[in-house]
Image (tube, grey):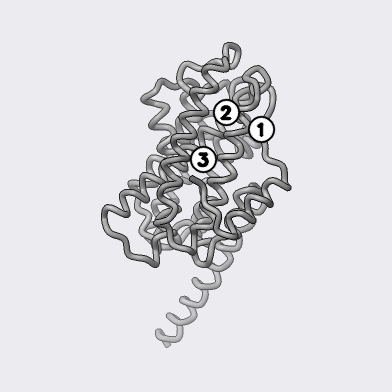
Amino acid sequence: MPTNQNSLDALSLERYSKAAITSSAEVIRSYSTSFGLATKLLAQPVRMHVQNIYALVRVADEIVDGAAAGALGRNSEFALSSELEKLEQETYKAMQSGFSSNLVVHAFALTARETKIDRKIVEPFFYSMRQDLQQNKHDQKSFDRYVYGSAEVIGLMCLQAFILEKEFAPSQLETLRRGAQALGAAFQKVNFLRDLAADFEQLGRSYFPDLNVKTFTEGKKQELVTDIRNDLSLSAKTIPLLPKSSRRAVVAAQLLFTALNDKIEKTPAAKLINTRIRVNDLHKLVILFKAWIGITPR
């Protein structure tokens, strides 16, 4: 009888886990067209793991910048902090036990346990999320720490899924880690530039050190564009090391954000603070096709 019960429990957990994974896939479909399309180029189970990572990140972001504020009020800093704290602690608990009553957290824990994402990578992410509730301006030190936690560690988490089925030398792993961090940083900095006015006027935030949209100049814009281009260049050099199961998707993301950075460079600073730069759907399809046929950025 105990053996039969154990079998039933295992089947129940398997069914529950499938539902959790499905819920995470729905999060990415609902929130991100571009990233969602790029993940289609990932082979399984890498795609599933990346979707599970994205879903947790999205939920945390909704606490500090979206749905939670809509329900609780943007001025309810204590309530928002409390919700973030609950999510963080539930994440650590699930990573240890392998179960959460929160479907998105459960799915992330499955990925964390299978790909060996440990707490020391997750903690900086939640630190940066807390900073969105506590800090409106950054100096270079706090900016670098924020970008590491909000973006670079996401790249490192995804990398754990990318390298799951292949052995690498320590020097290769270090190169891949640097590339993953650089690509994550580039993504974040591009998004900061795309959202300059909204962050400043609606949220009262200024992420880039010593930057004010009211005094934003062409020179400052070019400095930031060059910094992003350097990050993208570093990331591009690591792409040949990636397994085929993830290479196309990373190439698509790299090409997309290169295109966004190029458009930002061509957009006057005065216009950039009032316009959210985007790549049109046709251009996105061209990028996906290039990635599919094996074109790689330089």
First reached walking from the N terminus: tag 3 or tag 1: 3
Percent of width and height locating residue 150: 46, 38
User: In the rendered view, does 127 fall on the left or right side of 40?
Assistant: left
In the image, what residue occupies the spot 36% across and 25% down? 141
Amino acid at circle 2: Leu
Instruction: Tell me the quarter of the image containing the N terminus.
Output: bottom left
Q: Nearer the viewer, residue 181 or 218?
A: 218
Q: Which residue is mark 1?
A: 277
User: In the rendered view, does 168 fall on the left or right side of 30?
Assistant: left
Q: Which residue is mark 3?
A: 83
Residue pushed farthest left? 170
Labels 3 & 2 near each other (Cβ < 8 A): no
Q: Which residue is mark 2?
A: 193
Tag 3 secondary structure: helix
First reached walking from the N terminus: tag 3 or tag 2: 3
Mark pair 3, 1: CA separation: 32 Å
Percent of width and height locating residue 110: 45, 62
Labels 3 & 1 near each other (Cβ < 8 A): no
Amino acid at circle 1: Ile
Q: Nearer the viewer, residue 230 or 113?
A: 230
Amino acid at circle 3: Glu
Mark pair 2, 1: CA separation: 9 Å
Percent of width and height locating residue 108: 48, 56
Labels 2 & 1 near each other (Cβ < 8 A): yes
Q: Is residue 27 visible?
A: no
